[in-house]
Amino acid sequence: MSRIKIARADEVLEGQTVKFQFMRGGKPLEGFLARFQGQLVAYKNRCRHLPLSLDFYDGRFFASDGKHFVCHNHNALYEPLTGLCIRGPCEGESLKAIKIEVIDGEVWAGE
């Protein structure tokens, strides 16, 4: 994965997400960046149960409680800071994290 700019860190408010595209192994993939409890995290936008987007392509990743990410296909719940699935058919598995860093106020993903 080559390094890509996702967003300005101050534009991602608490409980918000930003989707982004990246390439890995020559294939286009989608990820999402989120701010939860003041921390920025990024994950590949794929459920661990089935290879489907978590958000039904509408950019909504947080469950109605605002405390978990949810797979809108089968309601699996994931802890935002770890990506661990705590309820659903993929319980015990984790979302694939994407390494991010903030440089001069901008969030970058990649190696």
Image (spheres, rainbow, N blue to C red):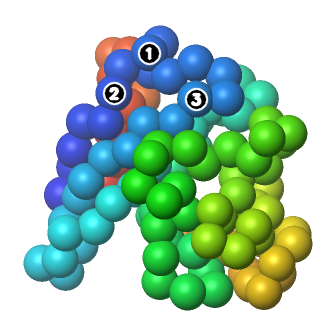
Which residue bears the numbered disc 3?
16
Q: Quadrant of residue 34?
A: top right
Identify the residue shown where x is 67% and y is 29%.
Answer: 15
In the rendered view, tell whether residue 13 sits above or below residue 44. above
Name which residue type carries label 3. Gln
Distance, label 2 to label 3, CA atoms, is 12 Å
Picture quadrant of residue 76: bottom right
* Residue situated in front as seen by the camera: 76 or 25: 76
Which label sits in the foreground, 1 or 3? 3
Q: Secondary structure at mark 1?
A: helix
Location of residue 59 in the rendering, given as x and y in whole percent from the top left corner: 47, 44
Kindly indicate whether the residue at mark 3 contacts the one at mark 1 (C-beta within 8 angstroms): no
Q: Label 3 neighbourhood size at 10 Å, few (<14), some (14-19), many (20+)?
A: some
* Amino acid, disc 1: Glu
On the rendered structure, is 86 left or right of 47?
right
Asked if one can make out residue 84 in the rendered structure from this viewpoint, the answer is no
User: Pointer 2 and pointer 1: residues touching (CB < 8 Å)?
Assistant: yes
Q: CA distance from mark 1 to mark 3?
A: 9 Å
Residue with the mark numbered 2 = 7
Say which residue appears at 70% left-offset and 58% top-offset. Answer: 70
Q: Which residue is mark 1?
A: 11
> Callout 2, which amino acid?
Ala
Task: Report the residue at 47% width, 67% height from top.
Answer: 53
Residue 100's spot in the image, x, y percent? 43, 45
Query: Would you say 71 lies left or right of 78 here?
Result: left
